[in-house]
Amino acid sequence: MVFGPVSLIMNNYMSNYVVGLTGGIGCGKTTVSDMFIALGIEVVDADVVAREVVAPNSFGLNEIVKYFGEEFLLASGELDRAKLRSEIFSNSASKNWLNQLLHPLIRTSIEQQLKACRSDYCILAAPLLIENNLLHLVQRVLVIDVDQQTQLKRTLARDPSSAAEIKRIIASQVPQQQRRETADDIIDNSGDDLTIITAQVAELHQKYLALSAQDL
């Protein structure tokens, strides 16, 4: 869950057209969203938002500490994300409590940041766009698609988590087929050639510019 770097294009109007960018863990959402940023498009990243609402001294973090205890804090005073992630994937009651706390906070912040966007259209990057019922915030859905083997390989390369835990995360997300059926556009990011992805993003950028112009 995150709020990606935002390229501020100071126009005199808000973005009226929002593209939801989603995909499973390890699919390369950040790589693609960074390409849109390079084209001057603002990105609201739900993962960044999720970190912001549990920042040190925030209401969200204080509530988590009350519920789970101070052992869920790092020495720096920040949330121990790895410990919390292990807890919620092994305890459904903990997961439900955390969702009820954080989802409204995250949704409110996302809505505020989308309203502040000034580029011709904007991107809502959200790995749980479908699962967390955020589809009403977007006009179009772009899915970054990879096979499960690639998800495991890429996630293990950047995260010391066990393969079993990553598989649990994948299982907690909507099935690949359901995600594809929800999509208006799909980028297959299974390969390693970024020039192919860059070309697809450039093509989609022109499409979204045209769609956003119709929406004015």
Image: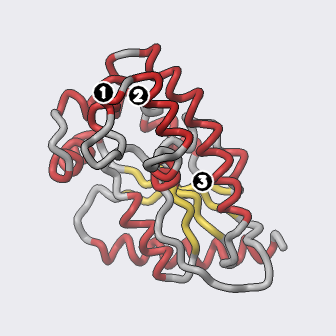
Query: What amino acid type should be assigned to the residue bearing mark 3?
Result: Val
Depth order, front residue of 16/77? 77
Mark 2, mark 3: which one is toward the viewer?
Answer: 2
The secondary element bearing badge 1 is classed as helix
Contact check, label 1 and label 2, Cβ < 8 Å: yes
Q: Position of residue 176 (x, y in %)?
A: 42, 38
In this view, 2 is above or below 171: below
Q: Which residue is mark 2?
A: 172
Image check: 55 left or right of 18? left
Q: Which residue is mark 1?
A: 168
Contact check, label 2 and label 3, Cβ < 8 Å: no
In this view, 1 is above or below 172: below
The tag on residue 92 is: none
Contact check, label 3 and label 1, Cβ < 8 Å: no
Sequence-wise, the earlier of marks 2 and 3 is 3
Q: Gap in Å between the C-alphas at discs 1 and 2?
A: 6 Å
Q: Quadrant of the C terminus?
A: bottom right
Q: Which residue is mark 3?
A: 141
Image check: 38 left or right of 121? left
Residue at image point 41% right, 28% down: 172
Residue at image point 47% right, 39% down: 61
Q: Find residue 193 and report its image quarter.
A: bottom left
The secondary element bearing badge 2 is classed as helix
Q: Position of residue 56 (x, y in %)?
A: 43, 48
In this view, 161 is above or below 192: above
Query: What amino acid type should be assigned to the residue bearing mark 2?
Result: Ser
